[in-house]
């Protein structure tokens, strides 16, 4: 053993060295304290994590790349209904239903390859054989020590949520059914009120007007005539008001001539509110059933009223087209619009009545979308199935008139058949026409079908035909009359003789359509004019 010489240190050098050693000792103690503190914190964190891991009601399992489970928390064991020994060293996919096993393997591969947190719903199977739905999330756990990558599986039994969703779906279906019934009840009540207005109040007002006209004729130079004239003006106002109510409740044009004609009529109506509406329609009728036609008409009317009230626009456009059996109606304007974020809020939807439109369209199996931006207007799109495009009514055939071969002398009475579903109306018309010596009333019919039978037997020269009747309406009856009895002239009669009704009756072969309230002044002259043209 070789001894090395110890350097000769002075007392001062030794004292300085001792002081340095003391400082180093203090530093080491402080570092040891910090390390111990960090160790304690890590241990405390581990304990908290372990406590959370073992107490959280969500299942956690750690698997390797092959899917083998080598760690699982108590909640996971409880959810799977398995013991720790049964779960460890077992492929997690073995807990999945057979049809979901492959999907789970793909989920794990995606987690490993793309480092994503992915989640899907699967059906899991307990050892007892019971099956339950679960939400499973795969999380990649990477190691800095070079250990193989691990996947942390988080899973939760969602049976209660699925039951709640199913209950919610059932309630939603029930709500939709109730909503449909409510809308249907509302529409039925509107139709009932409209029918009462048309079939009773309007008819009675017209009959009173007819009677007044007769009274005025009999008392031309009497002071009573002035009173009758004033009453006549009041009845005119009452009739105009009932027409407005009828149009608001259930427009006759919609019921009698379909959705296309109703939209054209609506565009004219909106002009009275200061909104100029252009309407574009398909070349041929879309053949939509009454219920859907009423729904779409109401929605378009509400959208146009929204435009008038909120957009500050003076123009709007309605475009109807279809693809296959899907009908599409777009209502647009170039008004002030609103922000896109407002479109999705229920408050905005309710404010503009859009929520009601969306719910009614959804209940009917359709859809409603609205888009808008400030100062760039609003576009609303209604879509619904049920379109059955029909062939147009052949205009040449509808308007064809075969000249009568018979000749009538000026003294020969004009035979007339009255067709109206209201007995009081028929009686009023009879009273008016019987005052003329050259008119003979052959009979009366309450609907188009009965009218055809009576024409076959009586062969009248003129048929005064109401439009709105049960069994067979006036338009359909007129089509049959002009084809089967070309020598018979048809004069249309209606409480509401709008352009759509006039066009329909003229296309069917009628010579003219007049309002019932004008019958006293115009019916006889219309009959004479029609007969003179047919000679």
Image (cartoon, rainbow, N blue to C red):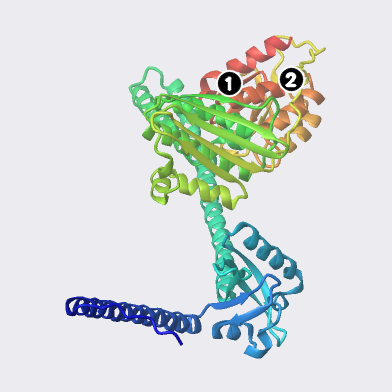
The answer to whether 127 is drawn above or below residue 388 in the figure is below
Q: Residue at x 57, y 32 (%)?
A: 262
* Residue 398 in sight here: yes
What is the secondary structure assignment of the residue under circle 1?
A: helix
State how many labels appear: 2
Q: Residue at x 74, y 67 (%)?
A: 102
Q: Quadrant of residue 390?
A: top right
* Residue 83 in sight here: no
Along the viewing direction, whichever of 442 and 102 lies nearer the viewer: 102
Q: Name the side, left or right, on which 310 lies relative to 358.
A: left
Going from N to C along the chain, the mark reached first, 1 or 2, is 2
Disc 1: which residue: 523
Q: Quadrant of residue 156?
A: bottom right
Along the viewing direction, whichever of 214 and 28 lies nearer the viewer: 28
Q: Residue at x 45, y 84 (%)?
A: 51
Q: Nearer the viewer, mark 1 or mark 2?
A: 2
Disc 2: which residue: 395
Question: From mark 1 to mark 2, how far is it between C-alphas?
Answer: 26 Å
């Amino acid at each position: 053993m070789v001894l090395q010489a110890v350097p000769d240190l002075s007392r001062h050098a030794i004292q300085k060295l001792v002081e340095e050693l003391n400082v180093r000792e203090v530093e080491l103690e402080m570092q040891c304290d910090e390390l111990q503190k960090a160790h304690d914190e890590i241990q405390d964190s581990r304990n908290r994590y372990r406590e959370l891991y073992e107490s959280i009601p969500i299942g956690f399992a750690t698997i390797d790349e092959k899917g083998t489970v080598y760690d699982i928390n108590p909640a996971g064991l409880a959810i799977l209904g398995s013991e720790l020994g049964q779960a460890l060293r077992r492929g997690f996919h073995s807990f999945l239903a057979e049809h979901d096993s492959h999907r789970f393997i793909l989920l794990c591969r995606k987690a490993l390859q793309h480092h994503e947190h992915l989640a899907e719903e699967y059906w899991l199977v307990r050892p007892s054989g019971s099956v339950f739905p679960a939400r499973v999330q795969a999380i990649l756990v990477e190691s800095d020590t070079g250990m193989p990558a691990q996947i942390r599986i988080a899973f939760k039994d969602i049976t209660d949520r699925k039951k709640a969703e199913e209950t919610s779906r059932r309630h939603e279906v029930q709500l939709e059914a109730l909503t449909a019934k409510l809308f249907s009840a509302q529409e039925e009540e509107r139709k009932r009120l409209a029918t009462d207005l048309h079939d009773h109040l309007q008819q009675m007002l017209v009959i009173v007007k007819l009677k007044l006209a007769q009274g005025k004729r009999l008392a031309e130079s009497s002071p009573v005539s002035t009173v009758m004239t004033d009453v006549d003006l009041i009845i005119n106002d009452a009739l105009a008001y009932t027409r407005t109510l009828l149009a608001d409740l259930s427009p006759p044009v919609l019921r009698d001539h379909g959705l296309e004609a109703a939209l054209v009529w609506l565009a004219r109506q909106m002009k009275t509110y200061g909104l100029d509406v252009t309407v574009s329609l398909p070349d041929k009728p879309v053949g939509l059933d009454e219920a859907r036609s009423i729904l779409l008409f109401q929605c378009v009317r509400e959208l146009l009223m929204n435009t008038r009230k909120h957009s500050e626009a003076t123009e709007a456009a309605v475009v109807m087209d279809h693809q296959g059996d899907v009908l599409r109606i777009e209502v647009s304007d170039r008004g002030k619009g609103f922000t896109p974020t407002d479109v999705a809020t229920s408050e905005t939807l309710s404010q503009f009545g859009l929520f009601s439109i969306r719910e009614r369209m959804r209940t009917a199996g359709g859809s409603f979308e609205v888009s808008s931006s400030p100062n760039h207007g609003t576009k609303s799109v209604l879509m619904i199935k049920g379109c059955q495009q029909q062939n147009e009514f052949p205009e040449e055939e509808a308007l064809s008139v075969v000249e009568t071969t018979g000749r009538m002398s000026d003294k020969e009475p004009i035979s007339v058949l009255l067709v109206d579903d209201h007995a009081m109306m028929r009686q009023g018309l009879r009273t008016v026409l019987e005052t003329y010596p050259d008119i003979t009333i052959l009979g009366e019919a309450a609907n188009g079908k009965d009218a055809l039978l009576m024409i076959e037997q009586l062969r009248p020269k003129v048929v005064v035909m109401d439009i709105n009747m049960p069994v067979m309406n006036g338009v359909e009856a007129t089509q049959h009359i002009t084809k089967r009895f070309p020598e018979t002239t048809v004069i249309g009669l209606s409480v509401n003789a709008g352009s759509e009704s006039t066009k329909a009756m003229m296309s069917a072969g009628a010579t003219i359509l007049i309002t019932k309230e004008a019958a006293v002044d115009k019916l006889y002259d219309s009959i004479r004019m029609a007969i003179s043209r047919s000679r």
